[in-house]
Image (tube, rainbow, N blue to C red):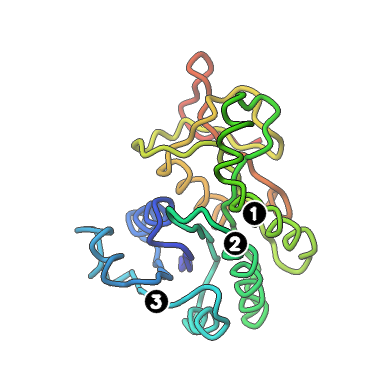
């Protein structure tokens, strides 16, 4: 299948592209800098026949529209981010608006967007006081993004919300829920997040998560699972 990935050069987006290619799918990677992306992607890929690299700015309508010129797209996955820039931003909200407009123009229906599970009732004191303050501008724009999604009825979006992302290998031992996960370690590897996104975008799991949030996290050590659980 053919998937367009926004934010493909970020730490989560690169995992999505790698996993799509390893599963035999075609990946269209929307990035700001194609040379930097090729170096990050490594051997698996910059020359892979099933990879197309599209250079552009997600806040520019003409660049986003150009990304949708390829025929036969099945789904869109957005892993937009700001890197180390923690200042005020509209990348999440305005970028997603442009993605939605372009999807409508092409009649595409499936979109998975990554934000964060930033309101978990069991979040630690450090998270509630320090992390949320540090990432305040990012979270404000995620709030705006979610308000945009709440008004969208004609596209089957899913708001995928990991808690804390880490660079660990794929485990497959994660859970997904439409509610905050009660029994989770508050961590998810980016490789597991990538697997979750692809399942929700292309697999049967996605049908029950249309117009829903999907919180994702590792199961706690005493309740591990051997395969992903979608509830």
Left or right: where 27 falls relative to 214: left
Q: Which residue occupies the foreground of this view, 141 or 51? A: 141
State the separation of the CA atoms marked 2 and 3.
Answer: 19 Å
Q: Where is residue 42 shown, x and y percent of the image?
A: 22, 58
Name the residue that disc number 1 marks. 142
Tell me the CA gap for discs 3 and 1: 24 Å
- Mark 2 residue element: helix
Q: Secondary structure at mark 1?
A: helix
Q: Which residue is mark 2?
A: 92
- Residue 56's disc is none
Are there few (<14), some (14-19), or many (20+) residues within 10 Å of tag 2? Answer: many
x, y percent for residue 151: 80, 63
**Callout 2–callout 1 Cβ contact below 8 Å:** yes
Q: CA distance from mark 2 to mark 1?
A: 6 Å
Q: Nearer the viewer, mark 2 or mark 3?
A: 2
Image point (31%, 72%), residue name = 34
Counting from the top left corner in percent of width and height, residue 210 is at: 70, 54
Is 90 drawn above or below residue 136 in the view shown?
Answer: below
Image: 135 above or below 217: below
Residue drawn at 40 percent across, 43 percent down: 191
Q: Find disc 3 in the rendering and name its residue.
A: 54
* Residue at the extreme top of the image, as rendered: 222
């Amino acid at each position: 299948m053919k998937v367009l990935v926004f934010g493909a050069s970020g730490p989560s987006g690169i995992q999505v592209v790698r996993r799509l290619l390893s599963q035999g799918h075609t990946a269209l990677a929307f990035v700001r800098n194609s040379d930097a992306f090729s170096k990050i992607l490594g051997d698996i890929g910059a020359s892979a026949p099933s990879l197309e690299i599209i250079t552009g700015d997600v806040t520019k309508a003409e660049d986003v529209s150009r990304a949708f010129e390829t025929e036969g797209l099945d789904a869109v996955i957005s892993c937009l981010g700001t890197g180390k820039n923690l200042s005020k931003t509209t990348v999440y909200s305005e970028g997603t608006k442009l993605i939605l407009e372009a999807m409508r123009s092409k009649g595409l229906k499936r979109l998975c967007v990554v934000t964060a599970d930033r309101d978990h009732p069991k979040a630690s004191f450090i998270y509630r006081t320090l992390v949320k303050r540090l990432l305040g501008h990012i979270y404000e724009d995620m709030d705006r993004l979610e308000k945009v999604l709440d008004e969208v009825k004609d596209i089957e979006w899913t708001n995928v919300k990991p808690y804390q992302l880490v660079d660990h290998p794929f485990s497959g031992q994660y859970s997904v829920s439409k509610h905050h996960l009660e029994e989770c370690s508050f961590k998810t590897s980016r490789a597991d997040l990538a697997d979750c996104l692809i399942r929700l975008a292309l697999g049967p799991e996605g049908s029950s998560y249309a117009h829903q949030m999907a919180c994702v996290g590792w199961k706690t050590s005493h309740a591990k699972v051997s395969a992903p659980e979608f509830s």
